[in-house]
Image (cartoon, rainbow, N blue to C red):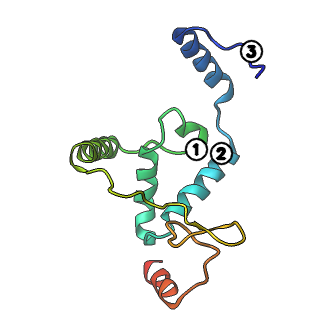
């Protein structure tokens, strides 16, 4: 593949990684705007009064080294500890209590006659699906 300068040991890789981060990881307004758009997209379904908490929650899921590069404030320590505990508990729950699926789950959808994937369920932001009375009413109630 023509890749050169690959460290040969894990220690050398860790040193190279630190040097790379020091040289190329810095704040950029573009990073902040991209982060803002992404987080706002995920918070879109929540009522406006929960958006502040949603931002703090999103900050707990981003690595501490990355937060300054995207212009995100550090979350409260109690929230980080709570989220970490919840995720660890969820991991234990899934590991020891969830049974394997008996049949495969179709997450991508079906291929139609034209060879295009057509989904039968929409998990996030279906811009290409027409508005219905129910979706418009729900938006008005939540926003």
Are the two marked residues, 1 and 3, in contact with CB atoms closer than 8 angstroms? no
The residue wearing badge 3 is 4
Assess disc 3: are there few (<14), some (14-19) or many (≥20) residues with their C-alpha within 10 Å of its C-alpha: few
Furthest-bottom residue in view? 133
Dot 2 falls on a residue whose secondary structure is helix
Dot 1 falls on a residue whose secondary structure is loop
Q: In the image, residue 25 lies at what x, y percent? A: 64, 30
Label located before the other in sequence (1 or 2): 2
Are the two marked residues, 2 and 3, in contact with CB atoms closer than 8 angstroms? no
Q: What is the number of the mark on residue 25?
A: none
Are the two marked residues, 1 and 2, in contact with CB atoms closer than 8 angstroms? yes
Residue at 54% over, 15% down = 14
Tell me: 44 left or right of 3: left
Residue at 25% over, 51% down = 98
Assess disc 2: are there few (<14), some (14-19) or many (≥20) residues with their C-alpha within 10 Å of its C-alpha: some
Q: 11 or 8: which is nearer to us? A: 8
Marks 1 and 2 sit apart, C-alpha to C-alpha, by: 8 Å
Mark 1 vs mark 3: in front = 3
| Vertical arrangement, residue 96 with respect to residue 11, above or below | below
Tell me: 23 left or right of 125: right
Label located before the other in sequence (1 or 3): 3
The residue wearing badge 2 is 31
Label located before the other in sequence (2 or 3): 3
Q: In the image, residue 108 lies at what x, y percent? A: 55, 61
The residue wearing badge 1 is 71
Residue at 47% over, 87% down = 134
Mark 1 vs mark 2: in front = 2
Q: Quadrant of residue 17?
A: top right
Q: 54 or 121: which is nearer to us? A: 121
Furthest-left residue in view? 97
Q: Quadrant of the N terminus?
A: top right
């Amino acid at each position: 593949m023509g890749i050169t300068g690959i460290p040969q040991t894990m220690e050398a890789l860790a040193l190279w990684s630190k040097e790379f981060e020091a040289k190329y990881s810095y704040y950029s307004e573009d990073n902040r705007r991209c982060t803002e758009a992404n987080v706002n997209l995920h918070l879109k379904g929540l009522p406006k009064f929960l958006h502040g908490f949603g931002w703090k929650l999103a900050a707990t899921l981003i690595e501490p080294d990355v937060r300054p590069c995207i212009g995100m404030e550090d979350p409260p320590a109690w929230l980080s500890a709570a989220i970490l505990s919840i995720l660890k508990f969820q991991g234990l729950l899934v590991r020891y209590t969830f049974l394997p699926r008996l049949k495969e789950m179709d997450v991508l959808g079906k291929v139609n006659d034209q060879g295009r994937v057509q989904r039968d369920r929409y998990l996030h932001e279906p811009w290409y699906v027409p508005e219905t009375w129910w979706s418009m009413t729900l938006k008005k109630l939540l926003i």
